[in-house]
Image (cartoon, rainbow, N blue to C red):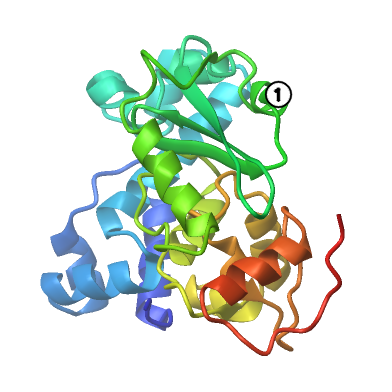
Amino acid sequence: MAAIMVPWITDLCRYIEAHATEPISLEHLARRARRSRWHVQRSFREAVGQTPHQYAAAVRRRRLQRELRGGGRVTPAIYAAGYGSPSRVYGSRGAALGMTPGQYRRGGEAVEMSYAAIPSRLGPMLVAATDRGLCFAQFDATVDDLRREFPNARLRPAGKGSAPGLAQWAKALSQHLAGGTPADGLPIDIRGTAFQMRVWNFLQTIPAGKTKSYGEVAVAIGAPRATRAVGTACGSNPVAVAVPCHRVLRGDGSLGGYGGGLDRKRVLLQSEGIRNLPPSPLHR
């Protein structure tokens, strides 16, 4: 379970955000925190859900996304976001975005995504993935919904030529929805703001059978006054169940919100062993 964010880790987060365009070594962060490299690495990852290096990469990625969404030219945007060269973005199949910067600016143009429908006792779920991981999983969604989310991506139904892991990941989700093995640890290929990524990464540290309040999540990611923003980030989670926003409740123990509906949230929690939830009639 993730540790509560302590002031020195919050300070490192703010420092990384302010200096993301500069090289930041673990040694430098350790000196700033007056702690060992090992202690900084371990404690930071436990509290934030990412290593300092991964956190800095997420900040740069968000800056690059913002520059590209604003219509900026690709190469200047890459340098403005803090990448030392275009190769750092284009290398490893565009690892900074999950697609090349030009593709991202054009709404996912030429990115290949495979999709499949999963039947379940909670209703149908549409799942989509790139070759890097799950990028979409929503109840009652249609291919049109997926197309609106990724208007220029190349979408193909599951089958020959699908993303290599789609069948395995879809099976894991299906088994979990049937009340089986938790679908934790599945590879995810999603993009969001630095704040959203902090929330989503923390959610993935909440084990099945446990819950957190929106306020506890806010404290854990170093933003104790951002309870409402945490709720908004949970609501915008593009990959239901695998990023378990259903494990977040209101401070009084009530269910709060859920994109798939409160009835589904309650059933998911009950299937993970959570009891004493407020009753709610099943709406169909």
Q: Is 64 placed above or below 40 here? A: above
Q: Position of residue 15 (x, y in %)?
A: 38, 61
Where on the picture, by quarter, is residue 228?
bottom right
Q: Is 105 placed above or below 261 here? A: above
Work out which quarter of the rendered image holds the N terminus and state it: bottom left
Q: Is 135 placed above or below 249 here? A: above
Residue picked out by circle 1: 148
| Mark 1 burial class by Cα count in 10 Å: few <14, some 14-19, many 20+ | few
Q: Amino acid at mark 1?
A: Arg
Q: Position of residue 133 (x, y in %)?
A: 38, 37
In the figure, is residue 195 to the left or right of 129? right
Question: Is there any visible trace of residue 199 in the rendered image?
Answer: yes
In the figure, is residue 5 to the left or right of 95? right
In the figure, is residue 179 to the left or right of 49? right
Residue shown at 56% from the left, 72% from the top: 271
Q: Secondary structure at mark 1?
A: helix
